Amino acid sequence: MPRADFYLIDKPRFREQPLLLVCELAKRAFAAQQPTLVLARDFAQAEAIDELLWEFDQDGFISHQLAGDDDDEHTAVLIAPPGIETADRPLVINLREACAPGRYDRVLEVVAADPGERTGSRTRWTEYRQRGFEVNKFDM
């Protein structure tokens, strides 16, 4: 059964810089050798995640790149802005307002502390359940 895990940002560290949680999740996936697709809301956010992943782990390297290159299939963490088609991956980190498209085993929904964000996450929660996903919530 596929899973949808909702990570609700609560801790001050992530409230100040929500993309740090995305990097932490990508780091865990990379350590587990889980090919990951990060669905960014727009190109600026995709670039910000790319930049942050370079600086995030001073003791290690998280193999990543923006989608749209010949090396996409060989990159552990692929960051896709809207409009860039990518192959499905087992793990998706979704930052978009709609449920993640495609086929995957697990989706991680990162939800900011903003009340408007929480409203949209409730809609996605319901849609994932209707699609047969096991749905979980984690306060971060």
Image (spheres, grey):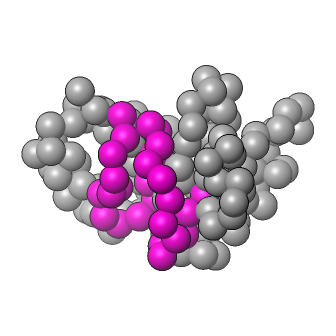
Magenta stretch contains residue 69:
no
Going 71% across and 54% down the picture, which residue do you hit? 71
Identify the image quadrant of the N terminus: top left
Going 15% across and 49% down the picture, which residue do you hit? 126
Q: Is residue 107 above or below residue 50?
A: above
Picture quadrant where residue 106 is located: top left
Residue furthest to the front: 70
Using residue 69 as the reference point, say whether residue 133 is left or right of it: left
Going 62% across and 48% down the picture, which residue do you hit? 73
Residue furthest to the right: 59
Q: Is residue 56 above or below residue 81?
A: above
Q: Position of residue 8 (x, y in %)?
A: 41, 45
Q: Position of residue 107 (x, y in %)?
A: 39, 42
Give the extent of the magenta segment: 79-105
Q: Is residue 67 above or below residue 35?
A: below
Q: Position of residue 105 (x, y in %)?
A: 36, 34
Residue furthest to the top: 32
Going 24% across and 55% down the picture, which residue do you hit? 124
Using residue 29 as the reference point, say whether residue 55 is left or right of it: right
Magenta stretch contains residue 84:
yes
Q: Position of residue 63 (x, y in %)?
A: 75, 43
Q: Is residue 139 visible?
A: no
Using residue 56 as the reference point, say whether residue 14 is left or right of it: left
